[in-house]
Image (spheres, rainbow, N blue to C red):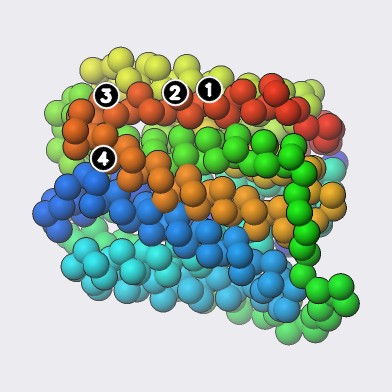
Amino acid sequence: MFQRDRVFWLGSLQASLVVFFVGGFGPAQPLLRIEQHTSLAVAGLHGTAMGIASILAGFTGPLLVHRFGRPRTTWIGMGFFLVGLVAFVFAPAVQFTLLATLVAGYGTSTVINAMVTRFTTHFGKSASNALSQGNAVGSIGYILGTLSVGTLATLGISWRLALLAVIPVAILLYFQSRHEIADEHIPAEGGPQRGAMSGKFWFAWVGFVACIASEFATTFWAAALIRDRIGSSPAFSTITIMAVGTGMGLGRWFGPKVLFRYQLNRKLKTVISVQLVGFSVVWFSHTLFISLIALCVVGMGLSMQFPLSSLRLIGFSDNRPDLAIGRSSLAAGSAIAGSPFILGVLGDHFGISRAYLMVPILIVIAFSAIVIVPSNEVDDRSHA
């Protein structure tokens, strides 16, 4: 039986803070592009900056965990995140927002990676439930970030100021976790986890790239798609993307309970299939209500892909979870850096609607990776 203990709530709330930025930042792309007078491709470079940051976090994560332990590494990441966040809010020019996004993205990836490995080792066979529901708590941050940005934009107030709301919460969480940071950490005698990964690991890694690429292509440009199809204002389009976050939150919290009888591979194939159904409706829809429902379904499909794909990678890592998650951060970085930018370039040339056909291609790749290289991991099927 999965128990939501202090480790669960602290890690989940830390994740929700960094996801607040992602939730507010992604759907605000049309607003940022108007402010900075940039093309879709240049605006997409913010996603590229986040991707590069994730790659850097992947290289440095195992070293930081070895030297400082996972609790301190989380707060190191949080420090970088907050510095980048403040810089982003008060830096109007595109070259400065790109640098700020890089710093904030590095902190975000460091926090998320430490959470995944900590939950995996702490909860054992119930890790899939813990990770999924921990990400559900994070989805609350995503929804609040989207709602805050959309509300301020609608009121004519600078939407960037909404991002500062995470600072007091981060300070409160820090004081609540000081005893963990104070605990002495003794680095392993063998040094950081290292070594070559198997061919199966890298095949699963490609599937992980496709999962993350489809998620960020959707969250970065869905607001632009809704605006193109329905003709709503940029601010209103931003608010509608809460539907994605709502679906992700529902899927992450209730998904483990609905799919508890399924093994890991079948769970992942199911949620990817749900994403494809929702995407198909979104792409063909020209009605706001239908688009909102379909975006919620897309969010449900996206909801469990990150934690389940991460567990597949850990299962192929020969008991080297920190190294596996470090390599997964390289995958996420490649996806985050490439997919929003490529979709933006395609959108400049063919229109955002046609460009969005990139997403089902990624979905097929992700699904195929599971079919071709199934994981042997059998996760806990108890109720959360």
Q: CA distance from mark 1 to mark 3?
A: 17 Å
Residue type at mark 1?
Answer: Val
| Location of residue 38 in the rendering, given as x and y in whole percent from the top left corner | 15, 52
Q: Judging from the image, what secondary structure is the residue with disc 4 in?
A: helix
| First reached walking from the N terminus: tag 1 or tag 4 | 4
Q: CA distance from mark 1 to mark 4?
A: 22 Å
Confirm whether residue 319 shows in the render.
yes
Is the residue 177 above or below the residue 295 in the image?
Answer: below
How many neighbours does mark 4 have within 10 angstroms: few (below 14), some (14-19), or many (20 or more)?
many
Residue type at mark 3?
Answer: Arg
| Location of residue 268 in the rendering, given as x and y in whole percent from the top left corner | 65, 28
Q: CA distance from mark 3 to mark 2?
A: 12 Å
Which residue is rendered at x = 47% and y = 39% of the image? 213
**What label does residue 345 carry, if any?**
4
Q: Quadrant of residue 198?
A: top right
**What label does residue 269 carry, if any?**
none
* Circle 1 residue: 364
How many neighbours does mark 1 have within 10 angstroms: few (below 14), some (14-19), or many (20 or more)?
some
Is the residue 172 above or below the residue 240 in the image?
Answer: below
* Circle 2 residue: 360
| First reached walking from the N terminus: tag 1 or tag 3 | 3
Residue type at mark 4?
Answer: Val
Which residue is rendered at x = 39% and y = 71% of the image? 84
Disc 3, disc 4: CB below 8 Å? no
